[in-house]
């Protein structure tokens, strides 16, 4: 199996995995949208919610990295620029979820 086929399959699998967790996120976002700071804090202080939010972030950024790399492949002709764009995207796609998850698991009132 070549690299493009693997990326295509991974993108489809990640999209399917995102669907149920996106439903969870949307329903809970609607629930906490007009709540007080303390209620939102308590929501994110729940270990199950922390775990599900972490999984949501990881899957979403993984899917984002795959999608953006395909956009770069299709629309950027210069190989050097394409490689730099892919490296920046991968770097940010790893760093942003890690920082968010670390902050989420270290929440203190």
Image (cartoon, rainbow, N blue to C red):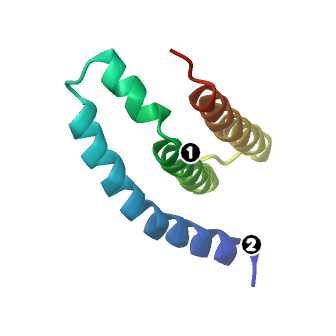
x and y, in percent, of residue 105 in the image: 61, 32
Q: Nearer the viewer, residue 68 or 19?
A: 19
Q: Can you tell which mark lies on residue 54? A: 1
x and y, in percent, of residue 67 in the image: 54, 55
Alpha carbons under labels 2 and 1: distance apart: 27 Å
Q: Is residue 81 left or right of residue 14?
A: right
Q: Is residue 3 left or right of residue 16?
A: right
Q: Nearer the viewer, residue 34 or 100?
A: 34
* Residue 84 in the image: above or below residue 52: above
Q: Can you tell which mark lies on residue 3? A: 2
Dot 1 surroundings within 10 Å: few (below 14), some, or many (20 or more)? Answer: some
* Residue 3 in the image: above or below residue 59: below
Q: Is residue 65 left or right of residue 21?
A: right
Label 2, secondary structure: give it: helix
Label 1, secondary structure: give it: helix
Q: Residue at x 75, y 79 (%)?
A: 2
* Residue 27 in the image: above or below residue 10: above
Q: Can you tell which mark lies on residue 68? A: none
Dot 2 surroundings within 10 Å: few (below 14), some, or many (20 or more)? Answer: few
| Quarter that holds the N terminus | bottom right
Q: Nearer the viewer, residue 86 or 10?
A: 10
Splitting the image into 4 quarters, where does residue 34 fall? top left
Disc 2, disc 1: CB below 8 Å?
no
């Amino acid at each position: 199996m070549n690299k493009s086929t693997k990326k295509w399959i991974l993108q489809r699998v990640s999209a399917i995995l995102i669907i149920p967790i996106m439903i969870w996120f949307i329903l809970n976002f609607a629930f906490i949208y007009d709540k007080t700071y303390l209620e939102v804090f308590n929501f994110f202080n729940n270990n199950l919610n922390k775990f599900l939010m972490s999984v949501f972030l990881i899957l979403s950024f993984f899917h984002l990295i795959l999608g953006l790399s395909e956009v770069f492949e299709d629309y950027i002709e210069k190989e050097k620029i394409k490689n730099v764009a892919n490296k920046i995207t991968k770097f940010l796609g790893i760093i942003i979820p890690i920082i968010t998850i670390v902050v989420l698991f270290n929440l203190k009132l």
